[in-house]
Image (tube, helix red, strand yellow):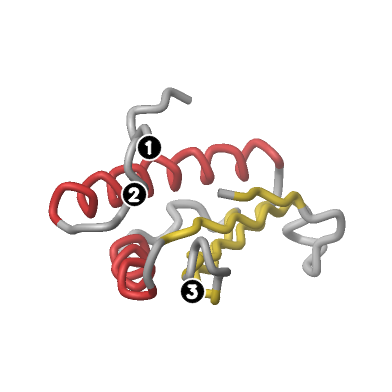
Amino acid sequence: MSHDTMATATDPDFPCSLSIDVPLPTQRLAKTALQALQVDKELSALVRRDLSIAEGDAQSPALLHVEYSATTNRMLRVAVNGFMESLKLVVEVMETLDVDVLEPGSNTNATS
């Protein structure tokens, strides 16, 4: 998973931003994750989130791309922490109920 802090934001009212790419093994799993995560809207009007699916590379054919922008770094941190908890749950459910979600030997119980 890659995290890129944007140096410049396009909206001066939402100057704090973060871009996250979550690699997934198939487009189907990326779409499933997208649909599961889109249901929950941001709780604060001070945070904006955009989810999309992007083409990956040979190792990760699909990327769940997430763009966050917020009015403050604190609001950004709180929103992203909540998103990561939801993402963890979605991946754990897909791992339990589906096949080929995670590489063999990967650890889903990583502590944050």
Residue 75 picture quarter: top right
Residue 56 picture quarter: bottom right
Q: Position of residue 23 (x, y in %)?
A: 49, 58
Q: Check disc 2 and give the amino acid type.
A: Leu
Q: Position of residue 45 (x, y in %)?
A: 54, 58
Q: Check disc 3 and give the amino acid type.
A: Ile
Determine the residue positioned at 78% across, 55% down. Answer: 6
Disc 1 crowd, CA 10 A, few/some/many (<14, 14-19, 20+): few
Between 89 and 25, the residue placed more toward the observer is 25
Q: Check disc 1 and give the amino acid type.
A: Ser
Determine the residue positioned at 16% across, 47% down. Answer: 96
Marks 3/1 in contact by CB < 8 Å: the verdict is no
Gap between marks 3 and 2 measured at Cα: 18 Å
Element under disc 2? loop
Q: Which residue corresponds to mark 1?
A: 106
- Residue 69 vs residue 22: left or right? right
Marks 1/2 in contact by CB < 8 Å: the verdict is yes
Is 54 above or below relative to 37?
A: below
Gap between marks 3 and 1 measured at Cα: 23 Å
Mark number displayed over residue 53: 3
Is 36 above or below relative to 90?
A: below
Residue 111 picture quarter: top left
Determine the residue positioned at 62% across, 45% down. Answer: 76
Determine the residue positioned at 36% across, 47% down. Answer: 103
Disc 2 crowd, CA 10 A, few/some/many (<14, 14-19, 20+): some
Between 100 and 76, the residue placed more toward the observer is 100
